[in-house]
Every structure is written in C-alpha cells, then in structure tokens.
Image (tube, rainbow, N blue to C red):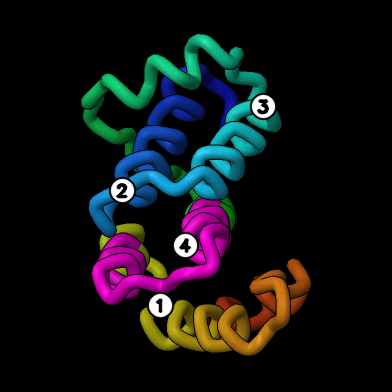
Amino acid sequence: MHTFEEKRSLLLEMIAFSTVDGKLHKREYEFLAIVAQALGIEKDVFNDLFHQEVPQLPIKTEFLRIQQFYRLALLMYSDGVIHEKETIAIKQIAIDMGLNPIATKRILKLMSESPNAIIDGAVLLNIFQEQHN
C-alpha cells in the first residue's frame, strides 16, 4: 500500500466497520488511531476521516486483503464485545474482498479462542494458503 488514497480507503473501511454496531467504542477509536499512525496518517487527517464518505479503492493483492481482514477482525475484538452485526459484516466484507469463507471462518474461530484475539502471522497465512490447495 503506497498511496495516501489507498491508506485512506483502508481506514475508511475500518471506520465504517467500527460503527456497524451503532456506536464507536473508545477502544475501537484507540485501535484505529494506532493503525492510522502506523500508516503515517496525521491525527487531524485521521479524525477528519470520521466525517467523510469516499468510495473505497479495491485492495490489489491477496496478501493486503488478508492483512486488512485481520485488521478488521482485531478491531472487532478490540472492545471486548462481539455484536452479531459485526460478525455478519466481517464475513460479508471478506467475501467482497474475494477471501475464502472457510479460511476466514477458521481465523475468526482461532481469534475467539485466543485470550487476546491475536494469532501468529504465519498461522494466518497458512490457513489461507491451505485453501488454495
């Protein structure tokens, strides 16, 4: 991900997902702020994104789509409450991204079983690669 537009698009998708349950929790906002900082998005630009509706750009590579799916899943777990709307939304987003539904279901299950919802990156990638075989 190289351009500002791509980074903004990723954050906009995450912001939209964070409010699918009807509210933005403090932990979700803090998680989004960390992602924005990691992407090199300044705080004022980040805060302005909450007031924008810009069409999302397609994510070009499967690796970047997997990475974005995992970010969204971490965001879903960040407030400690999993809403049915979030579960439905993340599964639909994964399908729209072209990710394998079986792999995404396995990832979400592993995350729910983990004490902090974090899974190893190699495990994450292996689950998606298994579905290619």
User: In terms of secondary structure, what is the magenta stretch mainly?
Assistant: helix
Tell me the distance, in whole angstroms, between the alpha carbons under discs 3 and 1: 29 Å
Residue 76 forms part of the magenta stretch: yes
Q: Position of residue 93 (x, y in %)?
A: 31, 61
Q: Residues within 10 Å of mark 1 (few under 14, many from 20)?
A: some
Looking at the image, residue 72 sits to the left or right of residue 37; the answer is left
Question: Who's the residue at 51% across and 47% down the image?
Answer: 28
| Residue at the spot of label 4 | 76
Closer to the chain start, of discs 4 and 1, is 4
For badge 1, the amino acid type reads Asn
Q: Is residue 91 above or below residue 106?
A: above
Q: Is residue 125 above or below residue 52?
A: below
Determine whether label 4 and label 3 are within 8 Å by CB. Answer: no
Mark 3 lies on a secondary structure that is helix
Determine whether label 4 and label 2 are within 8 Å by CB. Answer: no
Q: Nearer the viewer, mark 3 or mark 2?
A: 2
Closer to the chain start, of discs 3 and 1, is 3
Question: Who's the residue at 63% across and 89% down the image?
Answer: 113
Which sits in the foreground, 7 or 2? Answer: 7
Which quarter of the picture shows residue 13? top left
Q: Position of residue 129 (x, y in %)?
A: 60, 79
Which residues fall within the magenta stretch? 68-93
| Residue at the spot of label 1 | 100
Question: Label for residue 37?
Answer: 3
